[in-house]
Amino acid sequence: MQPKNHGLTRELTLRDLVMIQVILIVSLTWPAYAAKQGASQLTLWILAILLFYMPLAAVVMKLSREIPIEGGAYQWVKEGITPFAGFMAGWSVTIAVVALYAALGSTIANGFAYVAGPQGAWMAASNPLALGLTAAVCLLAYLINVRGLHLAKWFSGSGSILLMSTFAAMLYLLVRALGANNSKAWSAFSVALPSASVVTLNVFTKMAMGALSAFDQCSIFSEECRKPENDVARSVGIAAPLIALLYISGTAAIIAYIDPAKIDMAAAVPQLLQAGFGSEGVGGMMTAASVAISILALLAAIVISVGMLARLPMVAGWDGFLPAWWSHLDPKHKTPAKAIAAVTVALFLLGFVSLWGAGNDEAAQLAAAVSIGGFSMVYLLLFGSVLFGFRGREVKWGTGLKLGALAGFAVSAFALGFTLVPLGDVPSPLWFGVKVAGVLGGLFGVGAAMWWSGARRA
């Protein structure tokens, strides 16, 4: 199936796609999360890469060449299984990404508070500041995306470069520790087996789904790429080993300088830079810079994510499953301005609601669980289309791809189940699971109702 001419502008080159892959997938949070696992962290990374990351990359590379059309997983699952399954895949991506950024105002306010020191403590506790920052970021994302991907891709590229510069500093500290024969640095490369427990499996699924997903999201822009039948797949091939290197080396660097029990999950990278470079002079400047970079990287990720999410209802509008206005393009910039506005308003409203639980660990875990639940559903449908779909199409799946899809399907299924199990302390684990199930069930139900209404209208 070849791309159609819907009037979209082809802005994205291979380099742009690689930068988007990095900014959408890489997070400074996950190396700290993995480092908390101590000697078993490398084994967990390797298992997550082999059982989920590589299968996802392979499937995305294959389908981006076979079906290089706007919408990514929405279109692939629609072709592979049914239009309803495709719609739910797109809806699940929306759930996952919006929930991921639900607390963006609080996250940025906490970063400002960290840089300001003791005198900035009020920022972390100020809901008006967090709400104002949420509104400002949403407005920024709207204005940039309405102008077009030629501007949004500049943000994603700049954010990716800044993010990789932070990992370069972490890699330098790791190499320095290895050169000094630091036993903690060498222990980071141990292949110790993790304990066989439910907790370990919970950690593993969250590492796989939280840190190593999103290769498919660049394909949503397929008809806005210069060479969609080649460049999306090539961007995955370039970004995949780079991202794996960033995560593994970043985790090892944290373990080399900080005891796992003392890792500050909210600011592990600044903690590492202080430990490696000192807290004064250059060290202090690098610590502050790392916090600023994390905020800028978050802004870049939100900007490109808003543009990406707006393309999903646009495509559903083409198919008639949503009202046609979702697909209207701005006559000057050739962007889905109405869909972009709707996505930014939804993001702002969820950010407003999330402030009711600001500072509440259970609220943060609930948002993370909903996000992982959304991603899990997307990949259940995507890997399921490889295993059980495409019966009427000439898409050839080799044995290796099918085995990889089976592994990815299993990881996705376990991850969806473990969204009901909290990792941190909550007042009632049972009640937490009930709330997660209720929120996910309600959201998936809303998506199904939207499709049913659209299908009847179509």
Image (cartoon, rainbow, N blue to C red):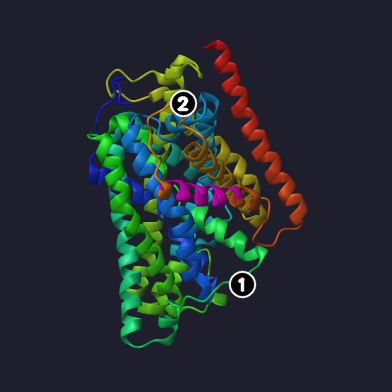
| Nearest to the observer: residue 134 or residue 55 | 55
How many numbered marks have been drawn onto this rendered protein structure?
2
Q: Position of residue 320 (x, y in %)?
A: 48, 16
If you read the primary sequence from the N terminus, does the residue marked by circle 2 or circle 1 appear first?
Answer: 1
Crowd around label 2: few <14 · some 14–19 · many ≥20 (10 Å) = many
Reply yes or no: does residue 2 show up in magenta.
Answer: no
Q: Position of residue 390 (x, y in %)?
A: 45, 31
**Label 1 amino acid?**
Ser
Crowd around label 1: few <14 · some 14–19 · many ≥20 (10 Å) = few
In the rendered structure, are the residues bearing label 2 and label 1 in contact, judged by CB atoms less than 8 Å apart? Answer: no
On the rendered structure, is 74 left or right of 196?
Answer: left
Residue at the spot 30% in from the left edge and 25% down from the top edge: 3
Residue for badge 1: 195
Question: What is the distance, in whole Å, between disc 2 and disc 1 at their CAs?
Answer: 43 Å
Query: Could one spot residue 167 in this view of the protein?
Result: yes
Question: Which segment is the magenta one?
Answer: 401-413
Query: Could one spot residue 298 in this view of the protein?
Result: no
Residue extending furthest toward the top:
457
Please name the predominant secondary structure of the magenta segment in the image: helix
**Label 2 amino acid?**
Pro
Q: Which mark is residue 313?
A: 2
Q: Dividing the image into 4 quarters, which one contains the N terminus?
A: top left
Q: Position of residue 428 (x, y in %)?
A: 77, 56
In this rendering, is residue 185 above or below 69? below
Residue at the spot 65% in from the left edge and 64% down from the top edge: 199
